[in-house]
């Protein structure tokens, strides 16, 4: 399975050499050159001097080491390239990924983990579950329908997007109901398996499991919210059977079903759905080896019992990095003769694996499940980590030695598999042990003053002196805002010219004076535009910022940065998380100059824009040598210093974004209260010392907030702006159910992740829905999120319509009075 030919002397990690074949820059190359490259790949794979041990990778990043897929997608969306060119880039990326794993000696190599947008959307396409509004009339789903579902189009909105468990990846939420006619409408899984085979690589096709797919879905518009999505399992299993039959006919011997919902709190009815589904599939799976993969947390005891009792399953995959309690379950009993895919290499962080520690875990598991039944694996897909450390030529050498990106993790998996087989490379293991010791003893990791300051925080809950209604009264006297005040979330479009200015300044191709002048001109343009649109509370547009977390991390101690450490967030959108390697502090003010400059350009209130401590934490690669809460408190103190400096500089409205607050919420309810306690506390620390007249805003995006609304209230912000429009106003239901909210609130009135421009009537309709459940004196009008990914040709009319809708409603409210 996935084996490549073996050289008799190739028995250690140190003998691995990746074949130097460039697959990633062929978009405009002739077909003959491409054919030569693919022929070279086939030869390289068939002659690779590697022994494939019991090793497995759950999934691999899709974007490419230098974001090749991102640029190909955006070129295609902009009409600058055609479908064939996009498909060429994709095929070359897939080939390079399979090559990397095969030459590294991985035995169980995944296919169908590549996606043009999202793996759940791919499953929706496979099942033909296209919402009627996209006008699909059957047949194989093409790019038009696929990307319309993901991004919307000029006439219909996109499907909802939400966080993938507790990661910063987003998936497209399936919309299902009793009338959906499922059909086999995308053969992607089979096509990619055949494609890899043609290159000489046998792969394990990966499918989102049928039960997790349904549990991750939502009732379509017009379907009762009480509708049981699991009742559809009998309708989708025939499609899964068709896919399995085709894979089997194509030569697949293993298939991986991802069922990550098994790590969440499931009731007995939901667990029974797994038993039922895999019993139904049993005959179709006959003659195949089936792996059920779980990840992101411990598997609860009842779910473990259900999982390990499933019929027709040969192996079970567990996250043993975030799910260490699962080890106890395995040791307490594991089904005889089955394979354990042991996820000991972290798929969600970038620290080098402690090989000695992992090997001990694997050897202990071998004693439980059998000598040849332990497969070394990643804890989850490597989608959630950066691609290749080789591309980081500017990273500090000592810090770089502590790290492993996806490509290095593949090699770590093989090193552990070799060692478990009895072919331990002592040189590799001793080098790894030295790296672990270096990190533990490095003086750059520890700052005693910071640790003492963070420890001292625990004696107070850091609340502001007066309650929110008194503060809002004081702020209104100072700000004199109209009813339904309008604002935006922070960023404005980041044009090619603007990115070029930042890039040239970083490369020292332009002077600081020229850079400051260019950024001031951009801020002035954004301020004038907002004044022309008659927006009430302005932003400076953040032209100086590359990323809302990286920008701050670059100015804080304890952070390191990459050049190509990109990670997919959704679609073509990638983020470059900073690396928090040590104690965090703020050497000097970070945003005061630009916020003060922007405020000096207008008489309107200008928001100071900061990223909150929880979001900086959750959107970074965080040190794993102390509790996350400790690191968060350190960041909170640094942001607190910045908030107080902004206030001293005369900035009266300060937004502290906590876009990722919910993202860090543990998947299991029993662990959530503790997280919310320290996360909300960290936010309050940042602004507990400001005056009543200073208005503190926060912003959250793309998550399900209803279950944590009381924690959001407990943050004690003066105003919260929050994603709402793309999730069908799901947020508003919490207020319909009687939750009282006394602070200012701005549920988003339009989806900024779609190029679609909403009409003023549509926005007014949304505001009216909000006014049905929220008092007019606390309601704000704003988009869902920042505007950096949009074009000015989209932003200007959308904001103009937003302001027009707010003014219309103000007039109507005044008339009603």
Image: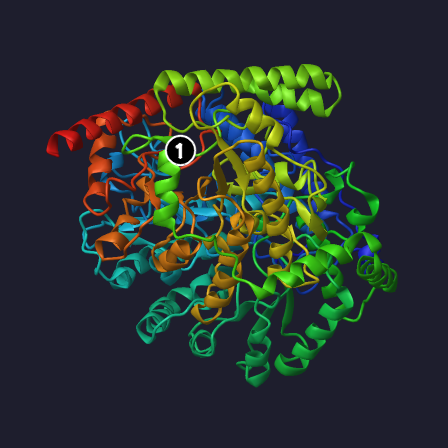
Depth order, front residue of 342/40: 342
Depth order, front residue of 394/55: 394
Q: Residue at x 36, y 35 (%)?
A: 477
Depth order, front residue of 730/606: 606
452 relative to 394, above or below: below
The x and y percentages for residue 751 are 35, 35
Residue 241 shows in this picture: no
Where on the picture, by quarter, is residue 365? bottom right
Quadrant location, the N terminus: bottom right
Depth order, front residue of 550/192: 550
The x and y percentages for residue 343 are 61, 65
In the picture as drawn, the residue positioned furthest to the bottom comes out as 332
609 relative to 13, above or below: above
Query: How many marks are shown on the rendered structure?
Result: 1
Q: Residue at x 59, y 26 (%)?
A: 594
The x and y percentages for residue 260 are 46, 62
Give SS at disc 1.
helix
Residue 521 lies left or right of residue 305; in this view the side is: right
Report the residue marked by disc 1: 478
The x and y percentages for residue 801 are 28, 23
Quadrant location, the C terminus: top left
Residue 267 shows in this picture: yes
Residue 722 lies left or right of residue 9; in this view the side is: left
816 relative to 230, above or below: above
Q: Residue at x 62, y 36 (%)?
A: 551
């Amino acid at each position: 399975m996935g084996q490549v030919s073996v050289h008799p002397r190739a028995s250690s990690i140190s003998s691995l050499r990746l074949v130097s074949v460039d697959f990633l820059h062929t978009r405009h190359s002739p077909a003959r050159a491409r054919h030569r490259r693919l022929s070279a790949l086939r030869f390289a794979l068939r002659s690779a001097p590697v022994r494939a041990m019991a090793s497995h990778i759950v999934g691999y990043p899709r974007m490419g080491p230098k974001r090749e897929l991102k640029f190909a997608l955006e070129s295609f969306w902009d009409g600058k390239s055609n479908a064939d060119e996009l498909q060429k880039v994709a095929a070359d990326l897939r080939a390079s990924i399979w090559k990397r794993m095969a030459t590294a000696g991985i035995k169980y190599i995944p296919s169908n983990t590549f996606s043009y947008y999202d793996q759940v959307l791919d499953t929706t396409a496979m099942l033909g579950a296209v919402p009627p509004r996209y006008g699909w009339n059957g047949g194989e789903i093409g790019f038009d329908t696929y990307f319309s579902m993901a991004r919307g189009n000029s006439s219909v909105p996109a499907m909802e997007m939400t966080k993938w468990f507790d990661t910063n990846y987003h998936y497209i939420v399936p919309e299902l109901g009793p009338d959906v006619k499922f059909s086999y409408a995308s053969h992607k899984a089979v096509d990619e398996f055949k494609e890899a085979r043609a290159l000489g690589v046998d792969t394990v096709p990966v499918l989102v499991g049928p039960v997790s797919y349904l549990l991750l879905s939502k009732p379509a518009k017009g379907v009762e919210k009480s509708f049981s999505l699991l009742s559809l399992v009998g309708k989708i299993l025939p499609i899964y059977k068709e896919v399995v039959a085709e894979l089997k006919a194509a030569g697949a011997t293993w298939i991986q079903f991802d069922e990550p919902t098994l790590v969440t709190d499931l009731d007995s009815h939901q667990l029974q759905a797994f038993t039922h589904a895999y019993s139904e599939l049993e005959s179709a799976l006959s003659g195949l080896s089936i792996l059920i993969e779980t990840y992101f947390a411990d598997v609860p005891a009842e779910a473990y019992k259900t999982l390990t009792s499933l019929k027709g399953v040969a192996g079970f995959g567990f996250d043993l990095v975030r799910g260490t309690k699962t080890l106890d379950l395995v040791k307490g009993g594991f089904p005889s003769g089955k394979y354990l895919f042991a996820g000991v290499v972290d798929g969600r962080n970038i620290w080098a694996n402690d090989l000695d520690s992992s090997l001990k875990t694997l050897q202990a598991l071998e004693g439980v499940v059998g000598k040849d039944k332990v497969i070394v694996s990643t804890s989850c897909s490597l989608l959630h980590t950066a691609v290749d450390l080789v591309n980081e030529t500017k990273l500090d050498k000592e810090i770089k030695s502590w790290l492993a990106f996806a490509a290095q993790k593949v090699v770590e998996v093989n090193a552990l598999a070799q060692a478990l087989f009895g072919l331990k490379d002592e040189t590799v293991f001793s080098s790894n042990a030295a790296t672990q010791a270096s990190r533990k003893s490095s003086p750059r990791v520890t700052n005693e003053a910071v640790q003492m300051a963070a420890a001292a925080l625990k004696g107070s809950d850091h609340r502001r002196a007066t309650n929110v209604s008194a503060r809002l009264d004081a702020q209104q006297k100072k700000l004199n805002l109209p009813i339904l005040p309008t604002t935006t979330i922070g960023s404005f479009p980041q044009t090619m010219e603007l990115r070029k200015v930042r890039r040239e300044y970083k490369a020292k191709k332009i002077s600081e004076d020229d850079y400051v002048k260019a950024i001031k001109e951009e801020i002035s343009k954004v301020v004038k535009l907002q004044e022309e649109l008659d927006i009430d509370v302005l932003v400076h547009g953040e032209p100086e910022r590359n990323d809302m977390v990286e920008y701050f991390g670059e100015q804080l101690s304890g952070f390191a940065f990459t050049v190509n450490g990109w990670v997919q967030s959704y679609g073509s959108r990638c983020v470059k998380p900073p690396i928090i390697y040590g104690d965090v502090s703020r050497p000097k003010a970070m945003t005061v100059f630009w916020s003060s400059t922007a405020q000096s350009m207008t008489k309107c209130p200008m928001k100071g824009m900061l990223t909150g401590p929880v979001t900086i934490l959750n959107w970074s690669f965080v040190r794993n040598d102390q509790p996350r809460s400790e690191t968060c408190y350190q960041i909170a103190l640094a942001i607190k210093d910045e908030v107080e400096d902004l206030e001293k500089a005369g900035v009266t409205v300060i937004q502290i974004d906590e876009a990722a607050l919910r993202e860090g919420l543990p998947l299991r309810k029993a662990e959530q209260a503790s997280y919310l306690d320290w996360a909300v506390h960290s936010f309050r620390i940042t602004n507990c010392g400001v005056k009543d007249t200073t208005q503190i805003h926060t912003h959250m995006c793309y998550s399900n907030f209803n279950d944590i609304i009381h924690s959001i209230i407990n943050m004690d912000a003066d105003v919260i702006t929050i994603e709402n429009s793309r999730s069908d106003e799901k947020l508003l239901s919490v207020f319909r159910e009687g939750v009282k909210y006394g602070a200012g609130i701005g549920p988003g009135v339009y989806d900024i992740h779609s190029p679609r421009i909403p009409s003023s009537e549509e926005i007014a309709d949304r505001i009216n829905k909000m006014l049905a459940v929220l008092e007019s004196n606390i309601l704000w009008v704003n988009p869902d999120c920042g505007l950096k990914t949009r074009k000015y040709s989209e932003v200007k009319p959308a904001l103009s319509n937003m302001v027009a809708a707010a003014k219309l409603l103000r007039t109507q409210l005044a008339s009603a009075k």
